[in-house]
Structure formats: structure tokens, C-alpha cells
Amino acid sequence: MSPDSDAGIDKQNVLAAITGASSTPSAPPSRPVDRPPSATRPAVKPARKWIQHRSELAAIVTAFVGLLWLSVGIARGAWAPAILGILFGVGALAIWSLEVWGAD
């Protein structure tokens, strides 16, 4: 078969018949009207420092509360407050580890 044997065949029509699509390529969507940018943009306030580091603060507060409960449990000789303090410590460790691993 010679390379010019398909010179009279419209390849787009054949492809359209196979795929069931229209043979004419669709026109690209029209662009919206270009508008000049606004002269004044709304000012965006930067986030406060404590909001940016709220999970670290949560871990610190949780660890502090855990130490308080642990010390109360040890001072009273009761296991319930001490176990509660240990659970708060585990919670602080979980918050910290999620923050550290989430930063990666």
C-alpha cells in the first residue's frame, strides 16, 4: 500500500464515525470580558500568632492539666486522679505527634 492511497479520505470524518462525535472540532470557549483590576483591594489581616500555633498551645495546656491531675492523684494517694493525669499526658503526646507528623 502506498502512502498516498488514503489522500482522498477525510480522516476526521472517519474518526467521528467511529467515535460517534461530530466531525468538526468544537471551538474553544469564549473568554470572559477582560476587566481592569480594582484600584483598591481589600486588606487581608495576617493571622494572629496564637492562631497559627493553636495546636502547640493545646498540647502545652493538655500537658499542664495532666501534670496537675497527676500531682493531685499522687498527693492524695488516689489512683483515679493519677490515671486521669496520665491520660491527659497521653493526649498531649497525641496532639504533639499529630502536629509534628502533619507538618511533613
Image (spheres, rainbow, N blue to C red):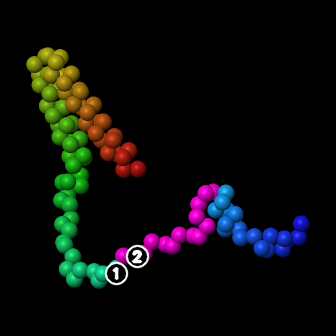
Q: Nearer the viewer, residue 27 or 10?
A: 10
Three-letter code, disc 2: Arg
| Position above or below: 3 against 66 | below
Cα distance in 3D space between marks 1 and 2: 8 Å
Instruction: Say whether marks 1 and 2 touch (CB < 8 Å).
Output: yes
Residue behind mark 1? 34
Locate residue 33 relative to residue 78 in the image: left or right: right
- Would residue 95 be found to the left or right of residue 23 on screen? left
Q: Is residue 24 magenta?
A: yes
- What's the residue at 26%, 33% (across, down)? 91
Q: How many marks?
A: 2
Helix, strand or loop status at disc 2: loop
Q: Quadrant of the N terminus?
A: bottom right
What's under tag 1, amino acid-wise?
Answer: Asp
46 and 32: which is toward the camera? 32
- In the image, residue 26 sits, relative to residue 70, either above or below, namely below
- Of residues 22 and 104, the one nearer the viewer is 22
Q: Residue at x 13, y 16 (%)?
A: 77
Residue at the outermost top position? 78
Dot 2 alpha-carbon crowd within 10 angstroms: few under 14, some 14 to 19, many 20 or more? few
Residue 12 position in % (x across, y down): 67, 68
Badge 2 is on which residue?
31
Q: Nearer the viewer, residue 92 or 47?
A: 47
Callout 1: SS = loop
Residue 74 seen: no
Q: Which mark is residue 86?
A: none
Q: Quadrant of residue 97?
A: top left
Q: What secondary structure prevails in the magenta region?
A: loop
Give the residue displayed 18% in from the left and 59% down from the top: 48
Displayed quadrant of residue 49: bottom left
Which range of residues does the magenta coloring cover? 19-32
Local packing at callout 1 (Cα closer than 10 Å; few below 14, some 14-19, many 20+) is few
